[in-house]
Image: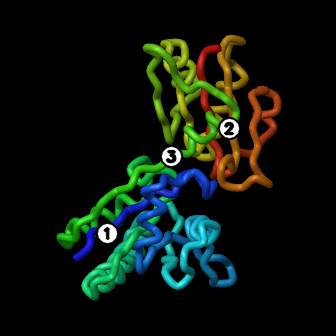
Amino acid sequence: MHPISIISLGPGDPELITLKGLRRLRQADAIYCPATVQPDGSLASRAADILRALDIDLAAIRPFPVAMRDDRAAALADYGAAVERIAAECAEGRRVAVTAEGDAGFYSSSGYVSALLAERGLLTERIAGIPAFVACAASEGVVIAEQTEETDVLTTLTSADELLGRVAAGRSVVLMKPSRYASAVKEALAQAPEGVAFHYFEHVGADADRAFYSCRRDAILERRFPYFSLLIVRRG
């Protein structure tokens, strides 16, 4: 039985997948992609969109629904259903891959799938990818950290003081999914001394028409942070 490939697709730009990841996609007989259910009942999948842009055989693409709610029970049930399908295809000797946006080991829901596969005794291999904040920094020539500077990557923030305290201590900070704690971020923006730089990104590497970047505090304060946004905050 072939190991199941957990393939990192990168932040959305099809050219930012690794050569190894692309090779595994081309070898796969079945490729599972997380998707969200639309109001009309159809499935929308950014991962599947990337595969189509890479000219992957459409017959191999298997979108599977994942509930996008704070209650994770529904999502876990969806992952379980996908694993049932994956296990069945593996038992028939097919090469199976599971896709993940960004890097599969970095705040990725593919970890739930990997854990369920491991419980079944199914072997997996994980192909590394480029996380969104690395792609964002590269797109505008922003340095995330240098020399002995340390970096914190956060998906939640309790207060503006927490962020400003980390930066005052000489740390650079990556704020992922800031829509979850926008008020704390904007309070920090308003209070931060001039020596603190805020680099704000939307949809970078995923949607060229909607991509946005600014390091101007007034411009950032005016934005309503979408789900696909992040900030890099540091001195300088």
Q: Residue at x 81, y 37 (%)?
A: 222
Q: Three-letter amino acid code at disc 3?
A: Ile
**Residue under label 1:** 4
**Residue under label 2:** 139
Q: Name the quarter where the N terminus is drawn.
A: bottom left
- x and y percent of residue 125 in the render? 30, 60
Label number found at residue 130: 3
Q: CA distance from mark 3 to mark 1?
A: 20 Å
Q: Three-letter amino acid code at disc 1?
A: Ile
Residue 175 in sight in this render: yes
Q: CA distance from mark 3 to mark 2?
A: 13 Å
Residue 86 as seen in the image, left or right of residue 198: left
Q: Name the quarter where the C terminus is drawn.
A: top right
Residue 144 as seen in the image, left or right of residue 118: right
Task: Give the mark nearest the N terminus, 1 or 2.
Answer: 1
Residue 132, by quadrant, is top right
Question: Circle 1 sits in a helix, a strand or a loop, which is it?
Answer: strand
Instruction: Check disc 1: other Cα within 10 Å, few if <14, some if 14-19, many if 20+.
Output: many
Residue 88, by quadrant, is bottom left
Depth check: give the residue in front, 117 or 7. 7
Q: CA distance from mark 1 to mark 2?
A: 32 Å
Task: Give the mark nearest the N terminus, 3 or 1.
Answer: 1
- x and y percent of residue 146 in the render? 51, 18
